[in-house]
Image: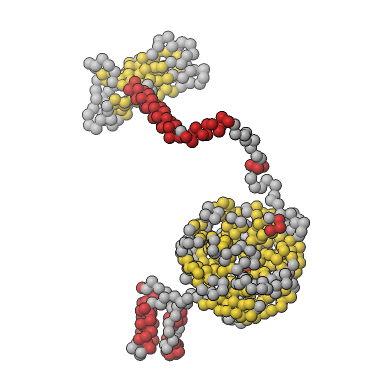
Amino acid sequence: MSESGPSPWLEAHSDPVAGLNTLSSCMDLSDLSGDGENCLVVADLGSSSSGSLGSGMKLKVFRGTSLVSESSLLDLPSGLVAFFMDLNEPRVPALAVASGPCVYIYKNLRPYFKFTLPGLEVDPLEQEVWQQVRSGQIDPLALKDLLEGIRSKSELPLSQRSLRFLSLEPENMDEFVTLHQGQPIRRQTVITCMGTLKKSTADEDGVSCLVIGTESSEVYVLDPEAFIILTKMCVPAPPVVMEVSGQFDVEFRITVACRDGAVYVLRRDYDKPKYCMELSSHCVSLVRVGKTVVVGCSDQTLQGFSQKGKRLWSVALPAPITAMAPMRVASRGFGGVLVALASCELRLYQDQWLLNSQRTPEPVTALTFGRYGREDGAVVMATRGGAMLVHILRRTASLRRPEGGGPPGAQSVRLNVPKKSQLFVDQTLREREQGPLMHRAFLADLIRTRLRAARAFSRALEASAGPSSEQGPLKLHATVQGLGPHFKLTLYVVNAAALRPVAGLSVCVLYDPALYAVAPPLLRLPLLAPGLTYALQTGVTCTGPALCDVIKVCVLQEGRGAPLLTAHINMPLPEAL
């Protein structure tokens, strides 16, 4: 049932007892027989009902509604991809299953090759301690103390053997040492995620390389034929989700979400990340749609980023994300994202716009979109209870954005740009030929304008053409209050000297008697102590016509003809106020 208009999906198949326990990274759709009918390949994680994690792990192949193949896996799978490893005919893809430190290659659903990750460096002190145990120099209890000291001080992690030994009870240590003391010490990493990268062409059946992310914070690109490491790159933290685009021989981008809560972009000829995307919380899933990287986060948000790590948009979701998959319909030129929520809901987004919301019987834990059977637009889902759901995109489905979404309509209207005239062409040639001369003339005019402005500002300061004035340690500031015709003129006088007081000062108000009456026009100042502000008030009454004039306030000193300070006050119009 759809919650936002007619549903674009047709419920084609539902198998509640399929028994699928998998992740989106362990599902793929591929034509394994070369007859044009795609199959569903699943690396099943098995069940933990028997007490051991992942018991009954299998590689399952579904054709239509039937399970046609099933084979056991040796370790818990972390990724599955179908890829073309050569140009041989018929064009049948191989399967790569990542389990533990190994990648198992299947051709025609039969084991073909096993690639093992290179071993990691072992701490020399740890090797020396186990050598002493082998020669009988120390007992198991002393071995435990030494290994705990190495683990607390060494930069390299301990090997799996030492970690298992430290977790044992004292009565089981002797048996463990006797069993393993003759074997060499190895430290092995495991695969956390896997993807494919086209080798030289972007064709659908082009040869692809395997891209592997490991627990040791490394990303490897493997040759598809010899299975040797073509390039090795490092990231700050172990990768958990990976999205790959481009060609290895031309240019490629590997977008990796790591366990430190950030997304990194790896590029050709760089052994370290080129760009970094800071997330608001840890990444749940990551897909690429066109040039946009869409990240589902654990804080119930769906965020879009550019290829250089710039955040483009963010959408809040009503429930946690359980699975995500890209939805690409080449025949319609459509690209979107399928988002499964814990609230039994399957949502379809194009950028930040919600196109459809579909209810599911159970929360979906894994899904993939592509060609299934002979249907180009099919989404295959695995639910929490192990059911398998297949929905097919209707041929009449509307995949348009809701009205009001996207950029405004005026953005798509073409501007009426006039044709280039001969005058425009001549002016362009003139600017091209005489560019330096025009730039020098512009700079000369700019400097001349700045000089005029500086001179005018200097003259204003010298003439004190404003309500404030400053001369030496004395400062004067005047304010006018009132609506008219009666105003209150407040004068603030400050002696900014450090120690020296000033005495014998008076304030005189000069005005036009035809317009104003000031009472009193002369104010005597007391002894101005250093650092104090003195406020004087006088009344101004507008007696003449409603004209705007300037009142001059002067600070005079006994025995000196010229005023020390002068401030000009522009009186407001009574009617305007």
Q: What residue sits 64% from the left and 59% below the top?
A: 337
Q: What residue sits 69% from the left and 59% below the top?
A: 329
- In the displayed structure, would residue 50 be above or below residue 538? below
Total of numbered circles in the picture?
0
Q: Nearer the viewer, residue 245 or 298?
A: 245
Q: What residue sits 46% from the left and 33% below the top?
A: 434
Residue 141 in sight in this render: no
User: Measured from the top left, where is residue 479 in percent x and y?
Assistant: 40, 24
User: Measured from the top left, where is residue 219 in percent x and y?
Assistant: 50, 68
Q: Nearer the viewer, residue 226 or 110?
A: 226
Residue 135 in sight in this render: yes
User: Measured from the top left, where is residue 31 in percent x and y?
Assistant: 69, 71
The image quadrant that residue 69 belongs to is bottom right
Answer with left or right where residue 534 lies relative to residue 117.
left
Q: Quadrant of the N terminus?
A: bottom right
Answer with left or right where residue 51 lies relative to residue 556.
right
The image quadrant that residue 454 belongs to is top left
User: Measured from the top left, where is residue 101 in percent x and y?
Assistant: 52, 76
Q: What residue sits 59% from the left and 76% below the top?
A: 105
- Looking at the image, the residue that sits furthest to the top is 514
Q: Specify how the rendered protein is coloured.
A: secondary structure
